[in-house]
Image (spheres, rainbow, N blue to C red):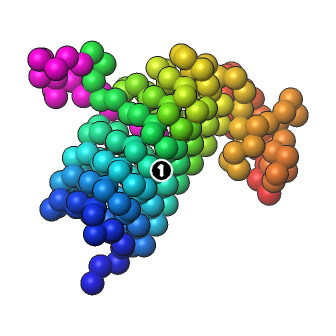
Amino acid sequence: MTDHFAHPTAVIDTDVEIGLGARIWHFTHVCAGARIGPGCVLGQNVMVGQRVRIGARCKIQNNVSIYEAVTLEDEVFCGPSCVFTNVLTPRAFVERKSEFSPTLVKRGATIGANATIVCGVTIGRFAMIGAGAVVTADVPDFGLVYGNPARRRGWVSRAGDVLGADLICPRTGERYREWAGTLELIESK
């Protein structure tokens, strides 16, 4: 008996750690050495690479591959078919496994459907990456980015709502302050 659910079509290699209450769906492959936190949901056809770290309560939608050198902190949402890379200049005929660049997605961030995250970047806490964006540079905490290449177009709250000029979350009433190109929460409800 296990403390998580894995669909019979899922392939779970040895030396894998899967947290309490995690759900792993159809045709998903979790490679050796991966660590998946409690309460995570991995949709259909997800691939979790060797030594990948996925925090608690992450939701990874269908057709996402999370390659070695990618770390997801707690409560990260990965939209359908979003893409992570791990080498900047891949070639089929050149071995570049020693060149993997680490990618960090911090707590509460959202990555939209079909977005591409180029290796070596950090996506800040509670940031929101628009669908189809190509992220080639770090994204600040609470940053709203989209486009190709992705650029910051605004700010979002912890709840994921776009903030207006007053920097007050319309859903929760939380107040934020912009300072030197960053955003910080100053009053929580």
Q: Amino acid at mark 1?
A: Gln
Please state which of residues 149 and 53 is positioned toward the viewer in this rendering: 149
The outermost residue toward the right is 166
Q: Which residue is mark 1?
A: 61
Q: Is residue 104 magenta?
A: yes
Quarter holding the N terminus is bottom left
Q: Residues within 10 Å of mark 1 (few under 14, many from 20)?
A: many
Residue 181 horizontal side relative to residue 65, left or right: right
Residue 80 appears in view: yes
Give the magenta-colored segment's residue range: 90-105
Q: Is residue 104 above or below residue 11?
A: above
Residue 187 rendering spot, x and y as whole percentages: 79, 49
Q: Is residue 168 magenta?
A: no
Q: What residue is shown at x 12% (from left), y 17% (from top)?
A: 94
Quarter holding the C terminus is bottom right
Residue 10 rendering spot, x and y as whole percentages: 28, 61
